[in-house]
Image (tube, rainbow, N blue to C red):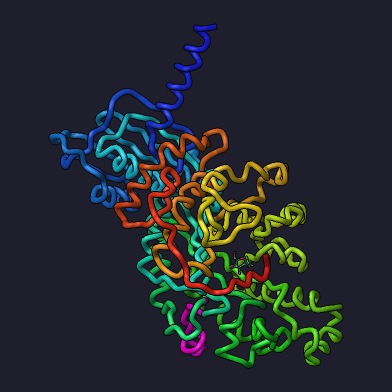
Amino acid sequence: MKHYSILVHLLLWAVSTSLSAQNLFPTPANYQRNKGEFIITKATKTYGNQTYADKIASQTSSNLTQSNENAVANVIAFFIEPQLKLAEEGYTLQVKTDSIILKAATEAGLFHAKESLLQLSRFGNGKVKCCTINDAPRYQWRGFMLDESRHFFGKEKVKQYLDIMASLRLNVFHWHLTDEPGWRIEIKKYPKLTQIGAVGNYHDPKAPATFYTQEDIKEIVAYAAERQIMVVPEFDMPGHATAVCRAYPEYSGGGEGRWQHFTFHPCREGTYRFISDVLDEIVSLFPSPYIHIDEVHYGNQSWFTDPEIQNFIKEKKLVDEKGLEHYFLRRAADIVASKGKTMIGWDEIIDAGISPRKAVVMWWRHDRQHQLVKALENGYRVILTPRRPMYADFTQFGAHKVGRQWAGYNTIENLYNFPEPISHLMKGYENQVMGMQMSLWTERVADFKRLDFMVFPRLIALAEAAWTPEKAKECSMFMQRLPYFLKYLDSMDIYYFNPLNPTEREEPGAPEKEDVLQNG
Ligand code: TNX
């Protein structure tokens, strides 16, 4: 019995040292520790076997952390070998005492290999323990959504987040650029969208206009692409269109009270022409095959009384206002498809009769698990971003006061452990689950400090949940390793929440405003 328990302890020790030795975020699918270490010095040479690999090699050499040991002759080599039988974004990384070899079949794979190596060099202070890593992501969609309509943060902050996303092997930046308080993207054909629509934010309707010019957008898209990140823009319709309607009242669907001009006018051809024109410019700026389009199931009070709208419902035999909303969404999906793109919509769209070939569903209503099941059963591809635990505007700690709660809040552990609690709902449909994303809505996030605090460190947990296979995930180990990544965030002046020392920093506040969270 005694021997047995010593054996168990030894085994646990071996497992924990081999896991904690890696200090990689996210934890790789397979990691094997070998004897010895590779020492990075100024004499370390890097090279690649072709153009992209060469570029990655030179980027690596300027970003590696060097040890302060004397120069040792050793080499780091990057190979792209398309014939390698590796998963789409997979890679291998072999560290020996005199060489580090990184291999992938694709550019994305080699990029991720490089980011792993940079972490190993950074967290090991220039010394990398010998190992063999065989890695590939669990999900193809590993995303982060930022809402810049409610509050605008600007190019430099976005670039900083893209850098951190790249390090975490996150590959989708879902950019929420249009919503009620402000329209944030320049559209040349409709200049009032930014002259008028970009004025104001969630707290201050008179705040000076803030938006991205088309040049800014190109710069961000290119910056992201360099980091193997796809930028997916969101253009909200038929609801959340208040900023558009302020600029071009002719497309407004009316509304009343709090919902004044909340929707597009759903039955005027001019609306669809406007949407098509705007999409032409959006499509030319974003190479992503996807465009995110919103939905609406509230704020359309005037649809019930406006004679023009009521006539249209009768004429087109749409039955009721819901039927009209679905008509709108089908037309939007067709416009998006006519431009060679696939629409992504929130989970309401599965009731609109859009072909699963034309749309991808983002499941957000955690309280409606049947919507997820229905989407899968109906053949849609699905991205998981349920409010619990994936919305970062929810608080993350018991004593925190600013942010949403709904029968609890979203701790770092909740994100880490996702999607296991709902795996049973997806049984048999795993191939339709593209992945997951953490989404930050910014009604209560008005400055960088609070933005950082809500995003980090939960984004690190999301990255591991989306990348690491279930069998290699272990939350307590992750929490033990977390300080390494927090130190890296320190070097970038990120004001994160520290779950290992929750009272270390104050929770940043947000300007007061009565929150009307219409949709729960
Ligand atoms: C839900 S469609 C929203 C956002 C809010 C968010 C707040 C959809 C996902 N809408 O408009 O900002 O909740 O948590």
The quadrant of the image that shows the C terminus is bottom right
Residue 376 visible at all: no
> What's the residue at 47%, 68% (across, down)?
510
The quadrant of the image that shows the N terminus is top right
* 300 sits left or right of 232 in the view: right
Bounds of the magenta segment = 183-202
Across and down, in percent, residue 92 comes to 41, 37
* 236 sits left or right of 266 in the view: left
* Snapshot quadrant of residue 252: bottom right
> What's the residue at 68%, 55% (across, down)?
366
> What's the residue at 16%, 42% (across, down)?
42
* Snapshot quadrant of residue 209: bottom left
Across and down, in percent, residue 428 comes to 72, 43
Quarter of the displayed picture in which ligand 1 can be seen:
bottom right
Q: Is residue 285 above or below residue 50?
A: below
* 201 sits left or right of 274 in the view: left
* 420 sits left or right of 159 in the view: right
Across and down, in percent, residue 317 comes to 86, 81
Across and down, in percent, residue 356 comes to 71, 61
